[in-house]
Amino acid sequence: MRCVNCQRPLTQDFTLTALLSAQPLRLPRLGVRCEATFTRIDTHTACPGCGRAESPQLCADCRRWQAQGLPLLHHRALFRYDAPMRLFIQQYKGQGNYALHQAFWHLLPQPARGIAWVPVTSEPHHLQQRGFDPVLGLFAGLPLQLWLTKADTPLPQAQKKREARLATPQSFTATLPRHPAATVVLLDDLYTTGRTLYHAQTALRAAGYRGTIRSFSLIR
Ligand SMILES: [Zn+2]
Ligand SMILES: [Zn+2]
């Protein structure tokens, strides 16, 4: 197998612990060298509300969500949005290199009973333009539950400045299964202002979901 990013052959080196583990083994599709170009966020020193790197106290943005009466998502993210990660996203979402969708599957949380993994899905016209849903691709290593639908909005989040992002109106609707899991983990590629994920949380509540809602993204 070859690295999905640089096409060099993958040299796999699994520890005995990983091989003997009861969890299904996820083979990395990203080479060690490529993975090392990205910067991991240390969860021990990240903001307890949004996962922002090196913010052990609740950050000002999270205090603002709380002041609006929204329960914190206790968001967690794997990587910082630095230059190598911007390039990755540009190749994956901008240029539509779909092979990259498996790059981080081996780092995703392990599926567990009682948790529903609910991705934040694309708007219909983005899906049509790109031909694939980037968030569904990145998290397809998990048993996803498609409870959320997103209506078309005039401008994509990525083209907006911060204030405009925060002012984005709700465009999600949620449809719950008859017996929803006790915990939902919302999934997105990138946490920027948190606006999208808090809208998703509100849509789940509006649909009558009463369990715990957390969130997770590849990048913060
Ligand atoms: Zn590589
Ligand atoms: Zn925060």
Image (cartoon, rainbow, N blue to C red):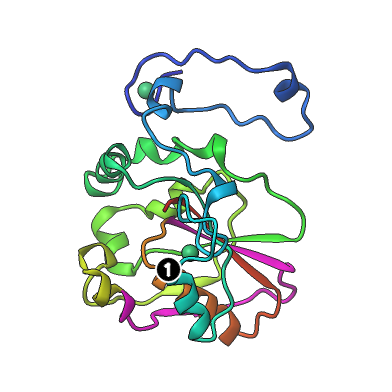
Viewer-side residue, 56 vs 176 = 56
Q: What residue appears at the point 72 percent right and 77 percent down from the top-left corner?
A: 178
Does the segment drawn in magenta span residue 39? no
Q: Position of residue 136 (x, y in %)?
A: 46, 53
Q: What residue appears at the point 53 percent right and 43 percent down from the top-left corner?
A: 42
Query: What type is the residue that disc 1 sits on?
Result: Gly
The part of the chain drawn in magenta is: 166-189
Q: SS for tag 1?
A: loop
Locate residue 39 relative to residue 90 in the image: left or right: right
Residue 4 sits above or below residue 140 on the image: above
Crowdedness near tag 1: few (<14), some (14–19) or many (≥20) residues, C-alpha within 10 Å:
many
Viewer-side residue, 25 vs 131 = 25
Residue bearing mark 1: 194
Locate residue 65 relative to residue 24 in the image: left or right: left
> Mark 1: is the Cβ under 8 angstroms from ligand 2?
yes
Viewer-side residue, 173 vs 49 = 49
Q: Position of residue 87 (x, y in %)?
A: 25, 40
Locate residue 165 relative to residue 38 in the image: left or right: left
Name the quadrant containing residue 61: bottom left
Q: What residue appears at the point 41 percent right and 19 percent down from the top-left corner?
A: 2
